[in-house]
Amino acid sequence: MVYLYRMITAVGKDIHAAASLLREGELVAIPTETVYGLAGNALNSDAVARIFEAKQRPRFNPLIIHGSSWDALQPYVKDVPALAHILAKRFMPGPLTLLLPKSALVPDLVTAGSDAVAVRVPQHPLCVTLLQALDFPLAAPSANPFGYVSPTTAEHVLQGLDGRIAYVLDGGASSVGIESTILGFEDHQTVVVHRLGGLSVEAIQAAVDSPVTFRKHPHLPLPAAPGQLASHYAPRKPLYVGDIRSLYAQFKEQRVGVLSFQEQYDDLDNVKCLALAADGKLTTAATGLFAALRAFDASDVDLILAERFPAEGLGAAINDRLRRAQQEFKGK
Ligand code: TXA
Ligand code: MG
């Protein structure tokens, strides 16, 4: 579909325009509280095929379906465990995605042939209003070219997808800043974390009496959460994670970018430091993480050194993203 790459991408806040385009089978980038999504009509296989094409994403990597409410998503799932209802009532709308058995209404292309579908209810007001105006749900991966850092502003979306989609609905900067937490269920009894994200594991555990476990093989592409491929969320510049001063000793001949939680590293020469959270909150650090990686890519630094973040709350998801962005994973 050659024309995809020649279209003019408009940017604005016009929900009616976005809804009309989506009804016509076009692609629209949508703001969510986690990251921007690259959306199309989830029930229209042609639109879904174009999402894969615009993002240059392999078709074995399935898409999340977004609905205006948990109730609105029920036609697309079946055999929903009681645990899923509890979590949905507690955390939807919000940065949570649930993996559930799919109904026949969901095209196979959306789930890459799997009988499970990932469903989510975003919290961003523009996005919710848009979803309420539509009589179909939206399939949407993050609105970045495959493998690159997810977008948290309309400008980021344009950097990667200008000319490939019809419209970017501009809802300002995403407040959470990292993708949703993806949960599945084992035997209706156990919650399985497939992807760490904007909802902390501690909050999930506090909401249920059942055990919360982690997926055993997070780097295997299938059957679950193939986006967990090792090299992902990666900036173009090489990135190393660890103790900043010892890493700096290895790289100090080069222009070094430092990504830190709070510390400024004023004592290190020739360093551009971005401290993510002056307030010491991991939620603040998550909000700014992807914009900081993009800022380093756009700057003249040769490489990025990142701290390891406190492994609690959203720190676990931040560390997960940084680990996958690391130089040693590139090409894997
Ligand atoms: O916050 C988010 O989740 C954002 C916003 C736009 O909603 N979306 C997002 O989508 O991060 P994406 O496609 O970049 O990541 C979704 C992940 C991928 O790792 C994909 O493999 C996994 O969810 N996934 C989607 N459907 C699945 C399914 N049926 N079975 C297993 N994994 C699935
Ligand atoms: Mg993604």
Image (cartoon, helix red, strand yellow):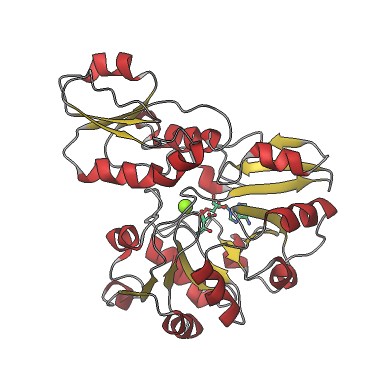
Q: In the rendered view of the protein, which quadrant contains the C terminus?
A: top left
Q: In the rendered view of the protein, which quadrant contains the N terminus?
A: bottom left
Residue 310 visible? The answer is yes
| Percent coordinates x, y for residue 90 in the rendering | 73, 54
The tally of labels here is 0
| Percent coordinates x, y for residue 212 in the rendering | 74, 37
| Percent coordinates x, y for residue 153 in the rendering | 36, 58
Q: Is 279 drawn above or below residue 133 in the view shown?
A: above
Q: Is residue 240 left or right of residue 204?
A: left
Of all residues, the one furthest to the front in this rendering is 279
For image coordinates 39% across by 44% down, the residue present is 288
For image coordinates 84% across by 44% down, the residue present is 189
| Percent coordinates x, y for residue 190 in the rendering | 79, 41
Q: Quadrant of residue 275?
A: top left
Q: Is 306 drawn above or below residue 177 in the view shown?
A: above
Residue 224 visible? The answer is no
Q: Is residue 124 left or right of residue 327?
A: right
